[in-house]
């Protein structure tokens, strides 16, 4: 890690200077292990060496999170990430987010530097640190919370925050605002395959697709994750109305709580119709919380007369109906069971329909033909949605919580289905 590399440079600097006198400087009155004002940060490089210059990549707007990673003019560099504003406890000084209460170069105000023999304590230049603080390179800090001196002077969190004297973005744990281990949220951007809540959690060039960072999938025509609303996160604009349905803790983040007369409805659209198409995949996480009677099935997703997923009442069997021949019947044998999260998905390739429960194939049937269509909207948690997205004629409500719904105009492989279930289970 970078802070270890910095320690090596510091040791080399000391060895080179043996026999000479160390510069005198004030010491901290609180805490142990303090260093001289020209100590660790002045004799080694905390962060990274960029074009021969030692750079604090945690706050440098020209090298934010790494050499050459410049922020936009309207952005600031906060904990190694370009952002619209600085995080709590820091202020913007020429695009760098600094701690005015402890930074000797910006003590109490931007560009207000302390004299060589002074330290910055509580936003004022002083002769020494107050009780409970540790002197680290001219800064009086709490090593339990200081990102630059986390746990000890010079033990910096190159990016991310310091929690309890440990760098939470560099400890192989998901223990603060991360969306996956040590990435996303307040940490660095996540790589492909890592969990995310939005595209801002991912590395540059990647989107947040079904809760995972990766390339944008043009065949994903609808993705409803229910993170604060019923909007479609696929970018295709198939936004839904909640119609009284509530957002509750889901399988990943929030989920859609469905009950009688309350479901998500989406207006009709050509991309949802897929008339004449021979490739379709649909998936969702579901938790049944009661019998869907008097309806025969509780609907997970419905595009009336074209494709539909549901749970058969009382038996809790996962079933589907795909209209490719003019026949609109239910098929399926996979039991999902009540009161627990189960991942269900269905694929159609123009010749075969396959069902998966918790990432494993549980049922197949032959079906040759192309998808049919009716002028109907899409229902999540109900059927019978009007083409304009109205729910007046809706029925067969699902009873429970639905999350992470997705529709593709391609056939997901068994490997893809299993990998998605494994990642989000």
Image: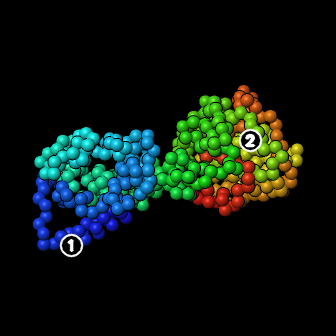
Depth order, front residue of 109/253:
109
Residue 89: x and y in percent read: 31, 42
Residue 282: x and y in percent read: 70, 49
| Residue 241 seen in the current view | yes
Q: Residue at x 79, y 50 (%)?
A: 331
Residue extending farthest top: 392
* Residue under pointer 1: 15
Q: Is residue 313 left or right of residue 208?
A: right
Q: Residues within 10 Å of mark 2 (few under 14, many from 20)?
A: many
The residue tagged with tag 1: helix, strand or loop?
helix
Depth order, front residue of 181/330:
181
Residue extending farthest front: 51
Q: Which mark is residue 185?
A: none
Residue 140: x and y in percent read: 20, 49
Image label count: 2
| Residue 289 seen in the current view | no
Q: Residue at x 44, y 53 (%)?
A: 69
Question: In the rendered view, how is the structure colored?
Answer: rainbow
Depth order, front residue of 341/314:
341
* Residue under pointer 2: 272
Residue 304: x and y in percent read: 78, 38
Q: Quadrant of the N terminus?
A: bottom left
Q: CA distance from mark 2 to mark 1?
A: 69 Å
Q: Is residue 53 left or right of residue 153?
A: right
Q: Earlier in the sequence, mark 2 or mark 1?
A: 1
Depth order, front residue of 175/217:
217
Q: Is residue 73 left or right of residue 268?
A: left
Q: Residue at x 73, y 49 (%)?
A: 409
Residue extending farthest right: 326
Q: Residues within 10 Å of mark 1 (few under 14, many from 20)?
A: few
Compared to residue 381, the image places residue 341 above or below, namely below
């Amino acid at each position: 890690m970078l802070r270890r590399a910095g320690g090596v440079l510091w040791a080399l600097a000391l060895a080179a200077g043996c026999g000479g006198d160390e510069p005198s400087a004030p010491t901290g009155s609180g805490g142990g292990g303090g260093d001289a004002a020209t100590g660790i940060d002045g004799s080694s490089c905390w962060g990274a060496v960029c074009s021969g210059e030692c750079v604090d990549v945690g706050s440098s707007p020209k090298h934010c999170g790494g050499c050459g990673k410049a922020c936009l003019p309207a952005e600031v560099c906060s904990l190694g990430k370009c952002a619209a504003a600085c995080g709590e406890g820091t202020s913007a000084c020429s695009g760098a987010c600094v701690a005015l209460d402890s930074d000797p170069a910006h003590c109490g105000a931007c560009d207000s530097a302390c004299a060589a023999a002074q330290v910055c304590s509580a936003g004022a230049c002083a002769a020494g640190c107050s009780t409970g603080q540790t002197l680290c390179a001219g800064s009086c800090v709490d090593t339990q919370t200081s990102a630059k001196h986390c746990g000890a002077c010079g033990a910096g969190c190159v990016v991310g925050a310091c929690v309890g004297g440990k760098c939470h973005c560099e400890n192989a744990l998901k223990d603060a605002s991360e969306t996956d281990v040590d990435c996303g949220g307040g940490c660095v951007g996540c790589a492909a395959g890592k969990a995310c809540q939005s595209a801002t959690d991912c590395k540059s060039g990647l989107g947040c697709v079904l809760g995972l960072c990766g390339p944008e999938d043009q065949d994903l025509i609808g993705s409803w994750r229910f993170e604060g609303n019923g909007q479609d996160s696929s970018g295709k604009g198939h936004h839904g109305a909640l119609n009284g349905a509530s957002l509750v803790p889901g399988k990943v983040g929030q989920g859609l709580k469905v009950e009688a007369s309350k479901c998500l409805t989406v207006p009709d659209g050509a991309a949802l119709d897929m008339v004449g198409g021979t490739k379709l995949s649909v998936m969702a996480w579901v938790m049944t919380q009661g019998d869907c009677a008097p309806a025969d099935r509780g609907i997970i997703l419905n595009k009336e007369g074209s494709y539909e997923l549901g749970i058969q009442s009382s038996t809790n069997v996962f079933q589907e109906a795909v209209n490719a021949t003019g026949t609109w019947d239910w098929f399926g044998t996979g039991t999902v069971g009540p009161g627990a999260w189960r991942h269900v998905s269905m694929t159609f390739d123009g010749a075969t329909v396959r069902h998966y429960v918790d990432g494993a194939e549980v049922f197949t049937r032959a079906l040759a033909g192309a998808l049919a269509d009716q002028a109907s909207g899409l229902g999540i948690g109900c059927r019978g949605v009007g083409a304009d997205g109205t729910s007046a004629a809706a029925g067969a409500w699902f009873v429970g919580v639905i999350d992470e719904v997705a529709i593709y105009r391609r056939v997901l492989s068994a490997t893809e289905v299993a990998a998605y279930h494994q990642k989000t289970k």
